[in-house]
Each structure stands twice: as structure tokens, then as C-alpha cells.
Image: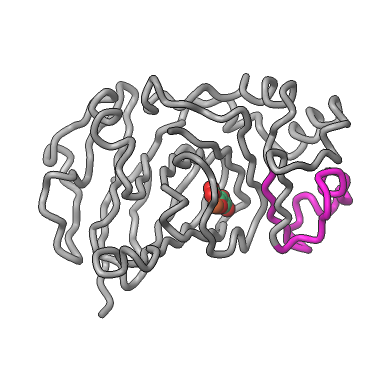
Amino acid sequence: MHTVLEADFGASSGSFRTAPDSGSGFWWIFRMDQTGFDNALAHPDDPLPEPGAVLNDPEDPPKPTSSIFEERYAYLPQPMIIKNAFMDWKARKQLTFQYLKEVYNRWPDALNHFSNECQFLPFKSVFATLNEFFNMPESDVNSGNPPWYVGFSNCHPNILKELRELYPRPHFLPTDAELPNTDYTFLGEGEGAVMHLDYIPRLMWQAQLQGNKTWFISPTPECDSKCSSFSFYVEAGDAVLIDTRIWYHGTITGQFSITIQSEYG
Ligand SMILES: O=C(O)CCC(=O)C(=O)O
Ligand SMILES: [Fe+2]
């Protein structure tokens, strides 16, 4: 059965459509305005929307404030998207390949440093190390040919400190949530992460800084009877919150994508 759950976010953020075979309603979308959460397009106390429902009435369901988000939503197992969550982050303009390369070149010992905490994930690209990645030919940086997509943790304390000057702690996270001492950067174009689960101690948040990306989500067998697979599309400024320990996830970019990803718990 092919079902579609669709929500219209209006002209500014475009429309949204899940992949075929979704429609379990087992996920949430929020939209942020300058003062906080503008509306929740679905609410845990509401009956699950009918497959195919269009959830576009800004007055109904109710508006969660940041503290309600913290209390009621932040630790739910359902994946969430928060539209326009990070519109004012400096990182959206300043955190580029060139910027990252400059920062890493100031702390060269971080370029060849590997450990469980300091991972370099080349996915399908040809780079074996961060050093090779940052030293790819200038012509390959923007051409998308050969295509590349990588992720790495910014675990060097000085690098992390410099990068965190470009973005704050996400303001909707619970104030007492524990955050790790490292944040990941994922960047590139085309095929991203293949479907996987993460072995991490906390929930995952990700900020889409530039470009856009489609996420593919599938439940683990324990939830097969209640949950279904779905996909969603995020644009620059959006937040993605997923418990990546219980939802298989994979990505594919549309336009060249840069994200910051970390954990909370
Ligand atoms: O952003 C991506 O492409 C993959 C991210 C991921 O696997 C994660 O956040 O756990
Ligand atoms: Fe992951």
C-alpha cells in the first residue's frame, strides 16, 4: 500500500512529502519562528493522522513553547524535524570547506589523529584520512566529480572551541541535557551514509547548515508492528532529532550539504 503524509509549510519553506509506504504518523514536525515554536504539526496526544492527511492548520494543534518542547518532546523516541531552527547561526555562512581546512591547518596534529572518539568516516569517497580529504585537488572541492561525502568528529579541543564560536548549544535542548565533548561535521554531495544504527550513548541532533538532504528511516524489528519506514527532506536551517540507536538511518543529499551533528541526553 502506498500512502502519503504531506504537510504544507507555506511559501517560505516549501512543501514536504514523505516517501511512499510511510504514513504511520510515527514522527513529528515542528516549525520555529523568531520567538520559539510556532506550531506543532502533530502532537503526541492527538490521534495519529490518517494516512494522506494534510497537516497544515497553524492554529490547531496547539503551540508548544520551548519549555514544553523540553518536557514533552525532547526525549520521545519518534524522529523529529524542526523547520527553521537554526536560521540565525553564523555557521550557516561561515562554516565552509575552506574554513574547516584553515582551522585544521592551524592544529595539524588533529589531521592524522585517530581513535574511537576521533573518527573519520569516508563513506564511499577515496580519502583514507582527514589529511587526504583536506588536501584533495582544488578542482575536486566543488566539482562533485569524483563525488565525495565524509563525516568526522571535531574532537581536538582547540578546533572544537573555534567551531563552536560559530554555533551555540541548540536553544531547544533541555537545559540540563548532557552534551558530548565532540561534534561531528558531515559534508559533501550525492550519496551520504548507508542505512545503519549508531552505537552511541545519547540521542542525536543534527543542524542542516547548507544545502539539503533526504533522510531514509526504518524501524528495528522490535517496532515492526507499529512503525514503518519513511523518509523526509531537510533544508538549510532545519534541525533533525533522531534516536539513531533505534532507527536505521541513511542519507542522500540534494545540493552540496554541510551539517553539524552531536548528541544530547
Ligand atoms: O548526516 C549524515 O549523512 C549521516 C548522519 C548520521 O549517520 C548520524 O547523524 O548518525
Ligand atoms: Fe548515524
Q: Which residue is painted at 81% across and 45% down in the image?
A: 130
Query: What span is in magenta?
Result: 124-152
Position of residue 202 in the picture relative to residue 102 (left or right) = left
Decide: is 230 above or below 106.
below
Query: 212 or 223: nearer the eye?
Result: 223
**Which quarter of the figure is the C terminus placed in?**
top left
Query: 81 or 243: nearer the eye?
Result: 243
Q: How is the image coloured?
A: one colour
Decide: is 36 above or below 209.
above
Decide: is 98 above or below 149.
above
**Which quarter of the figure is the N terminus placed in?**
bottom left
Position of residue 198 in the picture relative to residue 134 (left or right) = left
Residue 45 placed where, x, y %? 12, 44
Indicate the quadrant where residue 175 lies.
Answer: top left
Residue 121 placed where, x, y %? 70, 52
Q: Which residue is painted at 40% across and 61% down in the image?
A: 231
Number of numbered tags placed on the structure image: 0
Residue 146 placed where, x, y %? 78, 63
Residue 137 part of the magenta-drawn span: yes
Position of residue 145 in the picture relative to residue 63 (left or right) = right
Q: Which residue is painted at 57% across and 33% down in the image?
A: 92
Q: Which residue is painted at 37% across and 68% down in the image?
A: 221
Residue 209 placed where, x, y %? 55, 38
Decide: is 171 above or below 28.
above
Indicate the quadrant where residue 63 lies.
Answer: top left
Query: 8 or 174: nearer the eye?
Result: 174
